[in-house]
Amino acid sequence: MNRLADETSLYLRQHAANPVDWYPWGEEAFAEARRRDVPVLLSVGYSACHWCHVMERESFEDDETAAEMNAGFVCVKVDREERPDVDAVYMNAVVGLTGHGGWPMTVFLTPAGEPFFGGTYYPPEPRSGMPSLRMVLAAISEAWAQRRDEVVGAAGRVTEALAATAAAARPAGEPTEEVLRDALGPIRRVYDAEWGGFGSAPKFPPPSLIGFLLRLHARTGSALALEMATGTLDGMALGGMYDVLAGGFHRYSVDRQWLVPHFEKMLYDNAQLAVAYLEAFAVTGEPRYRQVAERTIDYLLAEMALPEGGFAAAQDADTDGVEGSTFVWTPAQLREVLGDARGEAAAAYYGVTAAGTFEAGASVLRPSGPAPADLAEIERELLDARRRRPQPARDGKAVAAWNGLTLAALSQGAWRLARPDLLAAAERLAAFLTETMTVDGRLMRVFADGRAHIPGYLDDHAAVAHGLVELSVATGDGRHLAAAETLARGAAERFADGGTGGFLYSARDGERLVAEHRDVDDNPTPAGSSLLAFVLLRLARIGGDAALERQAAGAIGLSLGMAGQAPHAFGTLYSAVDLLLAPPREAAVIGPAADPRTAGLLEAARAGFHPTWVYAFGDGDGDRPGQPALLDGKTLIDGAPAVYLCERFACRAPLTDPEAVREAMRA
């Protein structure tokens, strides 16, 4: 066993029995590299990563390869989900060196932590133009021994480039309506009009971009924006990437058609996609979007919920070392479960043929033909049979940022789907995040093995604050809004980059790496800086805080120059711009929480799609210290609950009839 056996990360523990003498990230590893005067071999991955497992089987479990690694290097293994700061800095280096990135990531560093060479997956033997890992090891060892000055010089140049990139952010001017309109053309150019989605294979789900397109449609009436959003949602739901039996989405598709996925299921994808389908349902009224959203949330509750109240990070791509074997079917397997006639009908419906779309003649299930009359029963029987198969491993650690996104999905799902059980799950999750995952007043990144650890990063704070705001909208409970404000304001201070007015990914009192990192693009979770700006804007509108709004606007302006180069990667930023440019509109719902009339007014005020409105809730029992400014002076009307609809805190006459509220919100 090496040093990884006692780590909380499932990914690190998966490597604990390797013959490689792995170290976890930390000063001990770099001190050993300095003592031995050897480079550091940094390997970064995550537990659900298929190619990470492949490289482990091929190289890290091979005694000869491990011996060369141990002889020439201090080997460090990092879970990118626990240490996204380390992953981000060195991924930027790898992309700068090679033009592309991915996992597993393999980077060679000086003992000072400066990168000088890197790549992703290396095979055990040379193939497809790639050198083998052992060839790379030999070349690096030779260069370190014979051409040290060149290596150190290269490391210095790469590190300088990383620092220059981090310092390059400059305000791009005031956000304008033209910024939103100008984004549409470049997004259209990468849109796949035939299959939905953006770009070609491999194709990843773009929930943040879909959210922006729905907002742009609501703002401008753009049919193109709506077409790209719904075309992508339909393509994903009809492809093999969507699990038609259990609900939820696999990580990404290897082809344009969304047919053959990489089979890992990530919490962050499913949380964000649930919201995307919920919002599409709100915009279009199409039941198919509601169904996908509801089944995705049900998948999270059934498969990813943890006893402590949080949600697990991921399910593996592989089962017993074979990717996707739990999820694929042959015609014979369908007949075995359903009988000959029903099995053939199911095969026709799901496009399962003898040729198969996957290894060994198996296929993913993709609705593509006439639906059998007893489809619901067929799906139940197939799911029961599938659950009797060996199942992929689950990474049971809870990541704060991803749980914050899940909190938002549960909260919005609770009221859009009229599901009290989702609200109860959201309340449990909020308690888990604000109590179990908060230590000495500070949000932690990871909960695993019964403890929370690693101080949270920018995206952790932004996503949890966002989820708490959404929970306040779902419940009308001001405590959640207050918790969101405390967390967001603290993050705005702790992660502030005083030189630019923006935010850094790591807190100013956190560990210092060889370069700073700015989290500005959505990849694949919302950019922390954009999401925090979005949350701060909502809080500023509720509280009438002009200074807070200016701070959020400054952070938004800092990223706009980069966004113009690839708008499809900045959906969260553009949604924040949409909110910033919208006239401030506020809804104050006043009435006792236990009064059914209050609940009816709350339902009416939320109904539909109103992404630029903000909400606050009071009981009508007088103003209270610390309450949002939006509630000041708002009272019951003749003893009855009421809704005050306002613009820049100038309010219309209060409304006490739910239908009048709905009509006013539609106007």
Image (tube, rainbow, N blue to C red):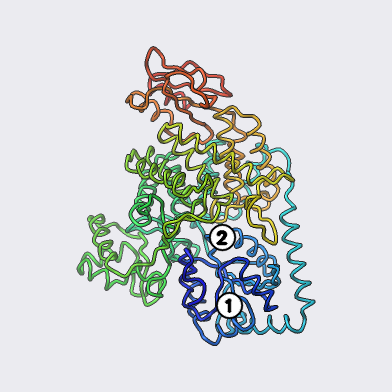
The residue where tag 2 is placed is 83
Query: Seen from this angle, which residue lies furthest top?
Result: 638
Q: Residues within 10 Å of mark 1 (few under 14, many from 20)?
A: many
Residue 497: image tag: none
Q: Amino acid at mark 2?
A: Arg
**At 35% across and 42% down in the image, what residue appears?**
424
Q: Nearer the viewer, mark 1 or mark 2?
A: 2
Q: Where in the figure is residue 34, as x and y percent of width and height?
A: 69, 74
> Quick check: 604 above or below 459?
above
Q: Is residue 625 left or right of residue 518?
A: left
Q: Nearer the viewer, residue 147 or 374?
A: 147
Q: Is residue 258 left or right of residue 222?
A: left
> Quick check: 218 above or below 333?
above
Q: Is residue 210 left or right of residue 549?
A: left
Q: Amino acid at mark 1?
A: Tyr
Q: Where in the figure is residue 273, as x and y percent of width and height?
A: 45, 50
Judging from the image, what secondary structure is the residue with disc 1 in? loop
The residue where tag 1 is placed is 122
Q: Tell how many labels.
A: 2
**At 45% across and 65% down in the image, what residue appears?**
261
Q: Where in the figure is residue 514, as x and y percent of width and height?
A: 70, 62
